Image (tube, rainbow, N blue to C red):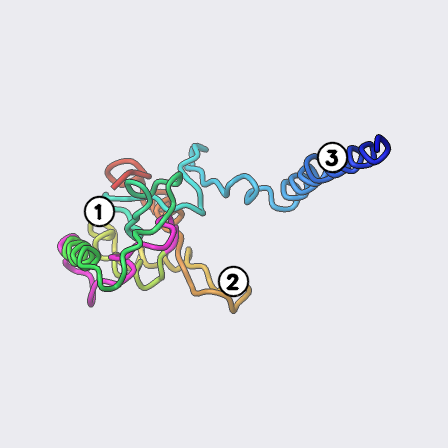
Amino acid sequence: MFSTLLIGLRAALVTLVLTGVLYPLAVTGLSQALFHEEANGSLVTHEKGQVVGSALIGQGFSRPGYFQPRPSAAGNGYDAAASGGSNLGPTSQKLRDRAVAEAGRLRQENPDAPGPVPAELVTTSGSGLDPHLSPEAVRWQVPRVASARHVAPERILAVVDAHTEGRTLGMLGEPRVNVLQLNLALDRRFGESVGTTAEAP
């Protein structure tokens, strides 16, 4: 019986060392060597070197000189510690009222925007932290951003086009624009807009 116990203890110890020490160290080492930026959270820095967010986590922008992301139902909004959607269904009156109110606000803040308000600007994502918008939702906001920055819309569109990501591997997903990186690019090109670069809505 004692020998059986020793065999079990040795097996547990070997398993512990392999799966609890060696494997995590190997994976961490490989990720740091091959995907250093991603392994450290895909952090985004300001031109002065200060970390202002992550390319993987959306955050709110309320100043007119910045592009606004999708609304967020994560915690009190854009709370990375409380990722989640609203869980409101298509028949929910609360969801309908919120979307109508959001569309009204956006239309008021974007009087020169072409066409109807894009649906993604009035609906939250499943995580509440989606950092991307479609190029169409970004372009819809260009007149407001251009007016607030006193820049020709064509110059803003050039920055948008330069920061539009294509499909992954040319076939997965849809074209998209990272809102934080786009707003930082605007600051680099045209100077910081009124207010801080990254701000709560």
Above or below for 29 versus 182: above
The one nearer the camera, 50 or 87, is: 87
**Number of the label disc, if any, that sits on residue 64:** 1
Percent x, y of residue 49: 45, 33
Residue picked out by circle 3: 17
* Residue depicted at 78% across the width and 36% down the height: 8
Within-10-Å neighbours for mark 2: few <14, some 14–19, many 20+: few
Q: Is 32 on the left-hand or right-hand side of 197? A: right
- Marks 1/2: CA–CA distance: 31 Å
Q: Is 1 on the left-hand or right-hand side of 53? A: right
* Residue depicted at 66% across the width and 39% down the height: 24
Residue picked out by circle 2: 168
- State the SS at label 3: helix
Q: Earlier in the sequence, mark 1 or mark 2?
A: 1
Q: Look at the image and give the residue range highlighted in magenta.
A: 108-132
Instruction: Give the amino acid type for the residue marked by disc 2 in the picture.
Output: Thr
Percent x, y of residue 129: 37, 48
